[in-house]
Image (cartoon, rainbow, N blue to C red):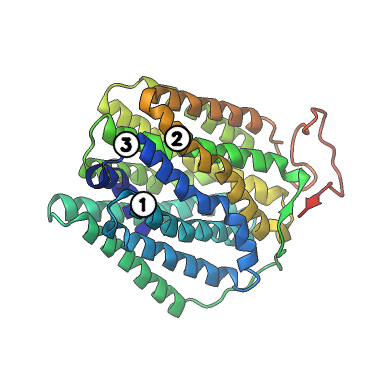
Amino acid sequence: MPLTFAVWNVLLNNFVIEKAAFTGQEIGLLQSFREIPGFLAFTAVFVLLILKEQTFALVSLALMSVGVAITGWFPFEIGLYCTTVLMSIGFHYFETVNQSLTLQWLNKEQSAHFMGKQLSVKSFASLFAYASIWLLMEFAGISYNAMYMLAGGAGVFIVILLWLTFPQFEQPAIQNKKLILRKRYWLYYCLTFFSGARRQIFVVFAAFMMVEKFEYTVGEVSLLFMINYVFNLLFAPTIGKWIHKVGERKALSFEYIGLIIVFISYGLVENAHIAGALYVIDHLFFAMAIAIKTYFQKVADPKDIASTAGVAFTINHIAAVVIPALLGIVWLTAPSLVFYIGAAFALCSLGLALNLPASPHAGNEVRRNLMGWANKMDAKPVSSEI
């Protein structure tokens, strides 16, 4: 996934500005369209009535790769919206299933460290992609179209290899094949919602600022992304171990305090090098979002994981569908205000993180419940099912 998606992601801002003359308004709309499949990720549970999760993951990867491969053939507004949605359907379905299978296949003692190693492996793949872009486009002079075709074609080829060489792994628990919303997961849902809102500020507008305001070239953007992923490659497994050691509440509180500072700094920065440093720090903080997933794993019924992964992706993308388009309009007149809004989202997340218990588990999901009184250790937590 990162090998293919990284190429689409790092080329996007330069491609849409150079080839389609996008402004902040168009890029915001494109990113909103990109998040619509994420908003609809809950529909994955219905696909699982037909396909096994592992098969569904491979089909999603193939669809994403095709979307990337054809992007360069449509360098105009409507064409870019369509290829982005196609790529995004595969990307978001894969991420939904990937999260579900990871939490199912790992025990709770291993999960934080493993997800750190998983980030490290993804970072290595992304680094390879960024290095390829830098060499092929800066020195060999290949076109955007050729780069997209190369990345998408490689993705399809790798999916075929995975299909032919890997066995079907056993599921440790039979998953519920219906949408489930449980009241006792409310804190997980809220953390997921604000995580999606904050991430859009980083993914859409921080990256766009590098190109529009500070005039980063494709090669410079690639190098910046490479630095990000070198940090992930080196430190993500350690971050996973640290989360397991200090607990989710401390890890997430540290992340959100750091993000508040970073977002405010984005709004004030006038130096290209300082902006790049903030971007690297921002990316490193997001590795700590592992703690949201490990918190859910500790409090969840194992049979709820697949269904809740789809619901969580939808909740994550409620804000993501709306925010890029709305803030794209704000960007036209007040770019700094976009980042101050991001700081406000991080502040809301900090308030939620402080409600995490020191030792979360089923029946002990929060320190204080929605109405403000102490959490009770209920043997039968209240639930609502759809």
Q: Is residue 70 left or right of residue 215?
A: right
Is the C terminus in the top left, top right, bottom left or bottom right quadrant? bottom right
- Residue at 69% x, 49% y is 298
Count residues near mark 3 (Cα–Cα under 10 Å), then give few for <14, some for 14-19, many for 20+: some
The residue at which mark 2 appears reads as 201
Q: CA distance from mark 2 to mark 1?
A: 23 Å
Q: Quadrant of the N terminus?
A: bottom left
For residue 329, above or below residue 245: above
Residue 217 location in percent, x, y? 21, 40
Upstream in sequence: badge 3 or badge 2? 3
- The residue nearer to you, when weighing 119 against 138, is 138
* Marks 1, 3: nearer the viewer: 1
Q: Which residue is mark 1?
A: 78
Q: Tell me whether the residue at label 2 lies in contact with that at label 1, contact meaning CB atoms closer than 8 angstroms.
A: no
Task: Check disc 3 and report the residue beneath it.
Answer: 23
Q: Are discs 1 and 3 less than 8 Å apart at CB?
A: no
Disc on the earlier residue, 2 or 1:
1
- Say which residue appears at 52% left-offset and 43% top-offset: 321
Q: Name the secondary structure under disc 1.
A: helix
Query: Given contact means CB atoms under 8 Å apart, are the residues at marks 3 and 2 in contact?
Result: no
For the residues labelled 3 and 2, the Cα–Cα distance comes to 16 Å
Q: From the viewer's perspective, tell me whether residue 365 is left or right of residue 207.
A: right
Circle 1 crowding by C-alpha within 10 Å: few under 14, some 14–19, many from 20: few
> Residue reaching furthest right?
379
Which residue shows up at 58% across the image and 36% down it?
194
Residue 247 visible? The answer is no
Inspect the image, locate mark 3, and give the three-letter code of the amino acid beneath it: Thr
Identify which amino acid the numbered label 2 is placed on: Ile
Q: Secondary structure at mark 2?
A: helix
- Asked if residue 360 is positioned above or below residue 100 in the image, the reply reads above
